[in-house]
Image: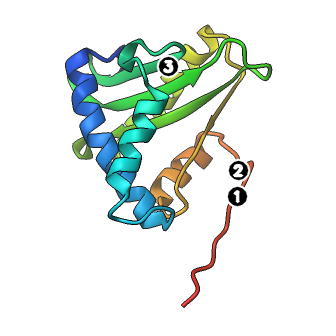
């Protein structure tokens, strides 16, 4: 079984937006950076700001992770600005649907992403991961990502 990165269709994109904006809002609340009542609107605005032209937004690549060219296993969103002086790209979102997790597909998807990124002239890929997402942090460490900045907080009672 093989994972491929296929450009999202408009229908896949609309489904992705609905799911990911909700999930992003939940994660920001869990991380303590947004309040629950403001999170849905802030997430919606963040996606609109980053993708003003949807799938046609310049230098943004949104892929459906496809298993054996048939099953939709997840998604991946990369921003690669060709004018970036460090030739750095940024993963804005990456995930697998629950039935596809824990089977090595995430590592395979990241390997396919490296191939695509190199084709785009990228020399470094960066991303953000929430500190509470230990599964994702372990995946990224296993696939060669290193921490470059750490923000720490302390909740006061």
Q: Name the quadrant of the C terminus.
A: bottom right
Residue at coordinates 41% horizontally, 63% vertically from top-left?
29
Query: Foreground: 140 or 68?
Result: 140
**Label 2 – label 3 distance at C-alpha:** 23 Å
Q: Is label 3 in a helix, a strand or a loop? A: strand
Q: Quadrant of residue 73?
A: top left
Q: Is label 2 in a helix, a strand or a loop? A: loop
Q: Position of residue 124 (x, y in %)?
A: 70, 27
**Label 3 – label 1 distance at C-alpha:** 25 Å
Counting residues from the start of the chain, the first of labels 2 and 3 encountered is: 3
Q: Quadrant of residue 30?
A: bottom left
Residue 5 visible to the viewer: no
Q: Give left or right: position of 7 versus 87.
A: left
Q: Position of residue 138 (x, y in %)?
A: 54, 53
Residue 124 visible to the viewer: yes
Query: Foreground: 68 or 155?
Result: 155
Q: Quadrant of residue 156?
A: bottom right
**Residue density around tag 3, few if under 14, some if 14–19, many if 20 or more, within 10 Å:** many
Where does label 1 land, which residue? 150
Q: Tell me: residue 49, above or below residue 151.
A: above
**Label 2 – label 1 distance at C-alpha:** 7 Å
The reply to whether the C-beta atoms of the residues labelled 3 and 1 are less than 8 Å apart is: no
Where does label 3 land, which residue? 60
Where does label 2 land, which residue? 147
Query: Foreground: 58 or 12?
Result: 58
Residue at coordinates 43% horizontally, 23% vertically from top-left?
52
Residue at coordinates 50% horizontally, 19% vertically from top-left?
60
> Closer to us: mark 2 or mark 1?
1
Q: Position of residue 151 (x, y in %)?
A: 68, 61
The reply to whether the C-beta atoms of the residues labelled 2 and 3 are less than 8 Å apart is: no
């Amino acid at each position: 079984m093989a994972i491929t990165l296929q450009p999202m269709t408009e229908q896949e994109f609309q489904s992705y937006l609905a799911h990911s904006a909700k999930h992003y809002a939940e994660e920001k609340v869990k991380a303590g950076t947004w309040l629950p009542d403001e999170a849905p609107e802030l997430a919606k605005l963040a996606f609109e700001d980053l993708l003003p032209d949807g799938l046609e937004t310049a230098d943004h690549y949104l892929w459906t992770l496809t298993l054996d060219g048939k099953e939709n296993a997840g998604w991946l969103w990369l921003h690669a600005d060709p004018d970036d002086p460090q030739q750095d790209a940024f993963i804005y979102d990456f995930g697998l649907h629950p039935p596809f997790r824990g089977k090595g597909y995430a590592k395979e998807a990241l390997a396919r992403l490296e191939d695509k990124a190199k084709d785009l002239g990228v020399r470094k890929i960066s991303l953000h991961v929430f500190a509470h997402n230990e599964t994702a942090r372990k995946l990224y460490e296993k696939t060669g990502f290193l921490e470059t900045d750490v923000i720490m907080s302390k909740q006061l009672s």
